[in-house]
Amino acid sequence: MSSLRPPLLKPDVTLSLALPPCPSPQPQEALKPEERGIHLIQLLLTCAKHASSSNLHRADDCLRQISKLASVTGDSMQRLSARFASALAVLLVKRWPGLYKALNQNNKYWPKQEHDRARRLFYQSFPYLGFSYAIMAQTLFHLMTDERVIHVIDLGSGDPKFWVPLMSSLSSLAEAPPNVKVTCVNGNKHVLDKLGPTLVKEAEALDMPFQFNPINVNLRDLSVDMLKVRSGEALALISVLNLHALLAEDDRVDAHFGINNNKSNNVKDCKKLGQFLGMIRSIAPKLFFLVEQEADHNLNRLVDRFVEGLHYYSAIFDAIDATFESRSSEERLILEEMFGREIENIVANEGIEREQRHERYGRWMVRFGRAGFKPVQLWVDPKEHVKQMAEGYGNKDGYKIINERASLMICWYDRPLYAVSAWTC
């Protein structure tokens, strides 16, 4: 079994599914932080097991004990526990749809501007997206050197922090800048309205022939004719933390009976994602960049997802702890609200509503291979990139990039958190 947290930061804590009915209550003042963390893990896993087997009274008893030890302003384990306990509570309340709807009338939807602010903070505070953008831009630059018409399709990101440096690099290609066309697919019209003028202004400053094609739909509703692909274009696509949403399907029957179709050697076909990748392959892209969370959250059994979620988000919260000095800072709370909503979606939702279906790179290899794609070597020097880019972040020694099977893993210490890969037909 593996350590729950990066070993340089926290004591070695292992997860076990051989759980007692409910760990005995422990007085908070009698527990050291390490002991409290272990006890919270035991309580959370026991609660998840009771929730999955509909033992509501025992699950409630665990939640009452967790509430005495967890806190959104405590150490990273206390804060993480508070988020997972909240997700379990939502899961239990959903058994009474009327009660759940009444309690969540004003809390279900997070304002778009708050999510956008959290995404900006994520970029500013951690190098994960910065590393990913640099890797994709460098690879695209090297492989598009001789192209005169470059069409890049953004599948849901819409982040100027990727596009502006990329356009600057492309402007230096050959004797004159290539004709660049950017298609941005995004369900949030505000993102498109903001990105378009920014890129047009950048293109004018670079004296670069430029077209911007905004598509205000989500990925599920995207059709090939919307992309306006023309003959002679060198085509590249990028998907940053978005493609896993297409794995959402109505698999509630499998979940109800505890059928696990996602074992390491059994990657279940997903009709919607298969159709989407088939559509993309039909336009013959030269490159398809994929950035995804390196975690197995697309598992049918709740307890399996819960264990994997604890592993993954404990590293995320440790990195937050190392970055923000104040546990009660507004920025930290905004970031953890974003991750808390991911956790709730993983734990409390089933079927088409469970969109946070993160999968490890090994599974994406299988899915892309089935659709007829082949991996492309990324152009990057991991050690040099880490050295250069981590300078602007608080705990630069904690960030690593490692090569793994034609992908690059962006790690917090030894825990891979995000995987970057590139594909071609």
Image (cartoon, rainbow, N blue to C red):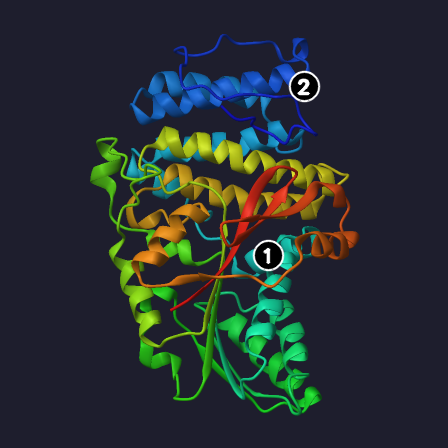
| As drawn, 330 above or below 304 | below
* For the residues bearing labels 2 and 1, Cβ distance under 8 angstroms: no
> What kind of residue is marked 1?
Arg
The mark found on residue 119 in the picture is: 1
Q: Residue at x 56, y 72 (%)?
A: 140
Q: Residue at x 67, y 50 (%)?
A: 126
Q: Estimate the spatial distance between the alpha carbons at disc 2 and disc 1, rounded to whole Å.
A: 30 Å
Q: Residue 44: x percent and y percent?
A: 47, 23
Q: Which quadrant of the figure has residue 233?
A: bottom left
> What kind of residue is marked 2?
Pro
Q: Which sits in the foreground, 87 or 295?
A: 295
Pick the quarter of the image with the C terminus: bottom left
| Any part of residue 358 in sight | no
Q: Residue 392: x percent and y percent?
A: 78, 54
| Any part of residue 416 in sight | yes
The answer to whether 358 appears left or right of 313 in the picture is left
Q: Which quadrant of the figure has residue 200?
A: bottom right
Q: Residue 270: x percent and y percent?
A: 27, 53
The mark found on residue 2 in the picture is: none
Q: How many marks?
A: 2
Residue neighbourhood size for the residue with mark 1, other residues' Cα within 10 Å, grouped as few (<14), some (14–19), many (≥20): some
Q: Residue at x 29, y 41 (%)?
A: 266
| As drawn, 339 above or below 40 | below
Residue neighbourhood size for the residue with mark 2, other residues' Cα within 10 Å, grouped as few (<14), some (14–19), many (≥20): some
Q: Secondary structure at mark 2?
A: helix
Q: Residue at x 42, y 46 (%)?
A: 362
Q: Which residue is mark 2?
A: 33
Q: Residue 42: x percent and y percent?
A: 49, 18
The tag earlier along the polypeptide, 2 or 1, is: 2
Q: Secondary structure at mark 1?
A: helix
The answer to whether 357 appears left or right of 115 in the picture is left
| As drawn, 342 above or below 255 | below
